[in-house]
Image: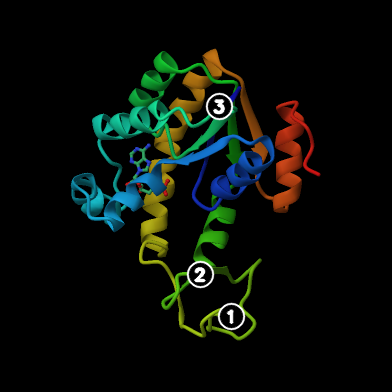
Amino acid sequence: MRKYVIIGAIGSGKGTQSELLARDLDIVHISVGDVFRWHVKNHTKLGAQVRRIMADGELVGDDLVEGVVRERLDQHDWNYGFVIDGFPRSRRQTEFFLESYDIDGVIHLDLPDDEVRRRVLARRLCAGCGMDYNLIADRPTQEGRCDVCGGELVAREDDTQEALAERLRQHHEKTDPILELFGRKEYVVTVDARPAIGEVQRTLRERLRLPMPE
Ligand code: AMP
């Protein structure tokens, strides 16, 4: 059984690295943001409670988040373990997590602020089918057009300079104390998130003493 937490700024590759880890180790990738997006999309009661908060880039209240995490982990569909992404995001959530679950490692994907800006401001989404692109690493064949459906590529509403500055500020304010709390009790592994996807994955496997990707 392997239980990991992955922490990092927006654009640091948390989702991508979690997926790679989950696929190979047969563990479950739990993204708290995805759980909320599912509720919003399916118009559940919880979705109605969090929709506005998410759209404004604010954090959902700790009680609600803890309830969602507890319920998700209570499903026990993670025989071989899990990697949780997007949680914890506050001191209280961290304390709750440390009291309720024992974890094997905390993966901290470290990315300097200017690289976060460069990556996030290059993100594009297809207005038609939702496919995502990145003007640095994953360019469409025809500029401004989706390779899949030909739709127009647009930036996400919250990927602006101003919104990003605020999200970065919040990230530092919240993440530093979390790392400090985990650092006291758990095994925090800080990995440089600047190299290519495969290299970051290999480094974190090495640091966690896990088998290397095929
Ligand atoms: P993410 O996809 O992880 O960036 O999450 C999207 C949004 O969901 C965030 O901007 C928050 O509004 C909400 N959210 C996700 N995880 C948490 C959390 N641990 N605590 C509070 N809000 C969260």
- Ligand 1 shows up in the quarter that is top left
Give the residue displayed 57% in from the left and 60% down from the top: 119
Q: Position of residue 1 (x, y in %)?
A: 61, 22
Residue ID for mark 3: 79
The spot of residue 88 in percent (x, y) is 42, 31
Distance from Cα at disc 1 to Cα at disc 3: 38 Å
Checking the image for residue 147, the label placed there is 1
Residue linked to disc 2: 131
Q: Residues within 10 Å of mark 1 (few under 14, many from 20)?
A: some
The residue at the point 76 percent across, 47 percent down is 199
Label located before the other in sequence (3 or 2): 3
What residue is rendered at 54% in x and 20% in y?
Answer: 103
Q: Nearer the viewer, mark 3 or mark 2?
A: 3
1 and 2 marks in contact (CB < 8 Å):
yes
Q: Where residue 81 sits in the image (x, y, percent)?
A: 57, 28
Q: Quadrant of the C terminus?
A: top right
Q: Give the vertical position of 136 relative to 50 (above or below).
A: below
Within-10-Å neighbours for mark 2: few <14, some 14–19, many 20+: some
As measured in the structure, the alpha-carbon distance from the residue carrying label 3 to the one carrying label 2 is 31 Å
